[in-house]
Image (cartoon, coloured by chain):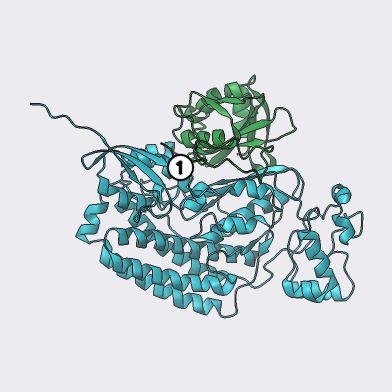
Chain colours: A green, B cyan
Amino acid sequence: MPGSTLTRLQESFPEAILGTHSRLGEDTAILKPEALRRVARFLKEDPRLRFDFLMDLTAVDHWKRKPRFELVCHLYSRSNNARLRLKAPLGGASPEAPSLTSLWPAADWYEREVFDMFGIRFRGHPDLRRILMYREFQGHPLRKDYPIDKRQPLVGPKD
Amino acid sequence: MTETTRTMLLNAGPAHPAMHGVIRIELGLDGEVIRQADVEIGYLHRGFEKHCEASSYTQCFPYTDRLNYVSPLINNFAFAAGVEKLMGLEVPERCQYIRVLMSEISRICDHLTCIGASAMELGAFSVFLYMIKAREWLWELVEEVTGARLTVSYGRIGGVKADLTADFAERCREVTSKVSEVLGEVDELLTRNRIFYDRMRGVGVISAESAVAYGITGPFLRSTGVDYDVRKASPYFVYDRMDFDVPVGGQGDNMDRYLVRMEEMRQSLRIVEQCLEQMPEGPTNVDPDGKLIAPDLMADLGKFGKTRGLLSNEVLIEPTLQGSEKRFHDRVYAADKASRLPAKEQVYSNIEALMNHFKIVMMGHGIRPPRGEVYFPMEGANGELAFYIVSDGSDRPWRVRCHPPCFPIMAALSSILEGDQMADIIPTFGSVNMIAGELDR
C-alpha cells in the first residue's frame, strides 16, 4: 500500500511534516530536523509500521538552495516489506541534526561519515569523529564548495 | 594475594597478512581475550561519490567496477538500474535475463573468494586453490562476454555492453557442472572437518536483533535466521520468475555464515541454469526512443534515411561541434530516453550512429535524467547494495550515494569481536567478507 505510511505519519505528526510525496513509487516524508528523532522513534516502535531497519543515512548538499543541506534516511520495514525515505533540510553555517544512534546503532558510523563528508554535526552522538578521512584532513570533501582537485597539507608522523 | 593485570594494546593491520584489504583494528587484549576493539577504516578511500558528481552518467560505470571488485557486475547493474528507474526506461527482456545471469555468476565468484580465503587462513590451503580455480573458470566466462576479468564496465544505461557469445550457454553449463563438483569437494573437506568446525562454530556470534539494529543484510544477516533477501522482498529484473531458496542459519556464528554462503552458491547455480533455459532471443538494449528495436533494424533505418527516430528531436541547434560551446549547453537537451550508446560497429560505419554516440558522450549533451531522486536496492554478494542518485536534470549526477553492504557489518565488528580470542579475529573477519573498495569507496 504505497502512501499509507505517509498518511499515518501525517495524521500523527501534522506539525512536524513539511511535505510528502511518492514519486517513482518511493514514499518520502520531509520533516523538520528537530522532530527527526521523535518521528523515527514512532516509525520504529509503532506496531503497525515497525520500520526496524535503518538502511542508509546520508546527506545532500544543495549548494545554492536554502536551506543548503538535506539529511536523507532510508528505512525499511521487514514486517510490511515497505520502504520510507525521511528527509530533513538543514541550514545555517554549522548545520546540526539530532543523532539517531539511540534508536539504531547503525546510525553511529553513518553519522560519522556524514560528519566527515559534509561537516554536519549530530547532537547526542557518542563519538563523532572522522571515519574515512584522517584526523588532520581539512574541509569536508562532499560539500559542493570543496574543489575536486584540492590538495591537502602533508601530514607527518605522529609523535 | 591479588594479581594486577593490564590491557595490552595491539594493532592488527593495516597491513596484516591475514587481513584481506587494508583495515586497522586497534585491540585491547587481556591475555588472549579481546576486551576492546576499535575498527578504523578509510585506507582505500578514493572519493567515488565526489568523482561521480564530476562525471557524466556513462562515465560512472568504470568507477562502480572498483567498488566491490570481486563482483563488479552487480555494481554495474545496480547503478544502471537506478538511472533507468529515474528515466523511466525499461530494458528488454533478454537484457534482464543477462543481468540476472551475470549477477549470479558474480555472486558465486564472491562467495568462492570469501570461503576460499577464510579456509586458507585457517590452514586449509587446498580449499583455497580449488575455489580460486573454480572462480577462474567463471571469470573466463565473464571475460568472454565482457572482455575483461575485473574491471568489466559491462552495464549500460538501457542495456548491456554486448550480447552473450554464440556458444555461451554450452560453455556456461560446462563450467557450472565443474563448479558444483568443486562445491561438493569443498563440502567434504570442510563441513565436517573437526579443526575447521571448532574454529568456526560458536565464534563471532551476533544475534538477530542486533544484526537488524546494525542494519546488516545479506548472508551475514541470514546466518542469524532472518530471511531478508532483496531478490525475494522486492524482486528486480526477472528474479520473480526464478525458482530459488533463501538459506538461513540459526546461530549467527561463523559456521552458519559458511553454510549459508555454500548453499547460496548452489542456489545461484540453479538460477543460472534457469536463466539459460528461459532466456528469450531479442535485443539487449533499448532503442534511443525507449522502444525496443533490434540493432540491425536500427542500422537499416539509418541507411534508408529514416533518421528522425534515431536522433533526439529536442535539439535546438545542430548536433555538431557547435553544440559543445558552453553558452549553448542550457539549450541542448537530448531526448529524455535517448540513453544507449550505439554499437561501436555502427558508430564507425554510419553517420546516424556516430551522431547518436556523440550526443551521448559529449559534455553538455549526454544522458539527462529528469530532476528527481531514486534509491534502488539490489542483493549484492554481501547484502543490500543500493545507489541513491539525485539528479538536477543536467548530464551529471548531482549526488551519487553508494550504500555498501559491508559497511554496517564493519560497524558491528568491534561488538562481535569483544569477548572472543585473539585468534578468532581471523575466521570472524574472514566471514565478514570485507571488500575495502566498497567499504571505503
Q: Position of residue B36 (x, y in %)?
A: 31, 36
Q: Which residue is mark 1?
A: B408
State left or right for residue B46 relative to residue B134: right
**Viewer-proximal residue, A126 or B370?**
A126
- Element on which disc 1 rests: helix
Task: Give the residue type at disc 1.
Answer: Pro
**Viewer-proximal residue, A27 or B362?**
B362
At 52% across and 25% down in the image, what residue appears?
A42
Q: Position of residue B380 (x, y in %)?
A: 50, 54
Can you name the residue that lies furthest to the top here?
A15
At 31% across and 48% down in the image, what residue appears?
B425
State left or right for residue B134 relative to residue B97: left
At 74% across and 31% down in the image, what residue appears?
A65
Q: Position of residue B330 (x, y in %)?
A: 85, 47
At 52% across and 42% down in the image, what residue appears?
A81
Can you name the residue that lies furthest to the right here?
B317
